């Protein structure tokens, strides 16, 4: 599903404008159609997700998709309009009587039901909107902590949402989940270096590039003499792997087989991206690493091994 800018703005209203629905079922079908028409890393509708939970993944995805559109598709209207639209979108999260409206926004009708059934505080979803505001007001990170702060809003809530939907968010699982999600966001940063350069963005902290004497300049002009940039990539991937290693213990604390394997696949997919990124070295400035069919086979095998190891060690 592709929306015009006017349609995107309609979905920031309580009624949903042209997309208004009369029932929860209509809202859930809208979210399912939206979610299954896009490919993302978020495991929407995966066969590894039990059917009873899929509607909740669809509603959370629909929320994230529209929020992303507000940050990316309204650029021509200027930052003020983008931020105002995100603020309007956020207000609907905190609408207490949303499910009692005779006609409603399909995304929030389904989402409020998910929040109710899965005990999801609106503040968790609101953190995602903070990240989209940061995208609109992009500032290049100076330190790695700047990137980690962004991950706190952009990535970590996704893991919390998944575990809350399964009823598994607690003090034990939370730190492992955050580590995995942070690792995935960082891996995505390094994977997308060539794309982000074209958009005028660098997510590599300037402090790290200066320390390693890389020559990808602040003005995004990269000359043929790229200095120590390969060492920068190696370092970034090494730092990122630490988060996957810290988080993979989560697998042993998940009682659902399919969720355990989904998480194992997600981690190994992130590691595969890191391996590809390291191999590309300086070429990452001009080429985005991608996953092949053979890579998927390796990911599947590695996920089985990780699943087996951590379930034997921690599983109950």
Image (spheres, helix red, strand yellow):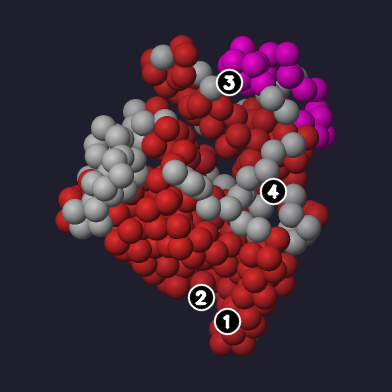
Q: CA distance from mark 2 to mark 4?
A: 23 Å
In this rendering, position of residue 221 left or right of residue 47: left
**CB within 8 Å, label 4 to label 1:** no
Graded by Cα atoms within 10 Å as few (under 14), some (14 to 19) or many (20 or more), the crowding at tag 4 reads many
Residue 44 - label = 4
Residue 164, x across and y down, in percent? 59, 55
Is residue 76 inside the magenta stretch? Answer: no
Q: Which residue is mark 3?
A: 12
Q: Are marks 2 and 3 in contact (CB under 8 Å)?
A: no
Foreground: 240 or 111?
240
Gap in angstroms between the C-alphas marked 3 and 1: 43 Å
Closer to the eye: label 2 or 3: 2
In the rendered structure, which segment of residues is drawn in magenta? 3-31
Q: How many labels sit on residues?
A: 4
Is the residue 221 above or below the residue 225 in the image?
above
Nearer the N terminus, badge 2 or badge 4? 4
The mark that comes first in sequence, 2 or 3, is 3
Identified at 63% across, 45% down, the residue is: 40
Identify the mark nearer the N-term, 4 or 3: 3
Q: Position of residue 111 (x, y in %)?
A: 65, 37
> Which of the 4 quarters of the picture holds residue 68?
top right
- Please provide percent x and percent y for residue 198: 42, 32
Determine the residue positioned at 31% across, 48% down.
204
Q: Are marks 2 and 1 in contact (CB under 8 Å)?
A: yes
Select label 3 or label 1 by which is in front: 1
**What residue is drawn where x is 47% and y is 14%?**
76
Q: Marks 4 and 3, how far apart in space?
A: 22 Å
SS of the residue at dot 4?
A: loop
């Amino acid at each position: 599903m592709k929306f015009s800018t006017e349609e995107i703005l309609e979905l920031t209203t309580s009624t949903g404008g042209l997309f208004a629905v009369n029932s929860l079922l209509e809202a859930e079908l809208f979210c399912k159609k939206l979610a299954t028409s896009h490919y993302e890393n978020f495991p929407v509708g995966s066969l590894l997700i039990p059917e009873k939970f899929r509607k909740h993944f669809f509603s959370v995805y629909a929320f994230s998709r529209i929020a992303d559109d507000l940050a990316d598709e309204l650029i021509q209207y200027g930052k003020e309009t983008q931020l105002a639209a995100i603020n309007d979108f956020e207000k609907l999260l905190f609408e207490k009587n949303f499910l009692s409206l005779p006609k409603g926004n399909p995304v929030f009708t389904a989402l409020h039901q998910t929040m109710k059934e899965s005990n999801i505080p609106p503040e968790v979803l609101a953190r995602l909107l903070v990240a989209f505001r940061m995208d609109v007001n992009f500032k290049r990170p100076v330190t790695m902590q700047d990137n980690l702060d962004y991950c706190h809003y952009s990535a970590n809530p996704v893991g919390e949402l998944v575990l809350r939907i399964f009823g598994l968010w607690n003090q034990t699982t939370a730190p492992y989940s955050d580590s995995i999600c942070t690792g995935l966001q960082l891996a995505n940063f390094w994977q997308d270096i060539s794309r982000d350069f074209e958009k005028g963005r660098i997510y590599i902290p300037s402090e790290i590039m200066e320390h390693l004497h890389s020559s990808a300049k602040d003005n995004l002009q990269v000359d043929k003499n790229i200095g120590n940039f390969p060492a920068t990539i190696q370092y970034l991937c090494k730092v990122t792997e630490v988060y996957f290693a810290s988080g993979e213990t989560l697998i042993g604390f998940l009682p659902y087989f399919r969720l355990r394997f989904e998480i194992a696949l997600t981690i190994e997919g992130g590691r595969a991206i890191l391996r590809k990124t390291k191999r590309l070295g300086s070429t990452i400035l001009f080429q985005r690493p991608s996953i092949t069919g053979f890579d998927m086979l390796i990911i599947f095998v590695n996920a089985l091994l990780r699943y087996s190891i951590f379930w034997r060690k921690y599983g109950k």
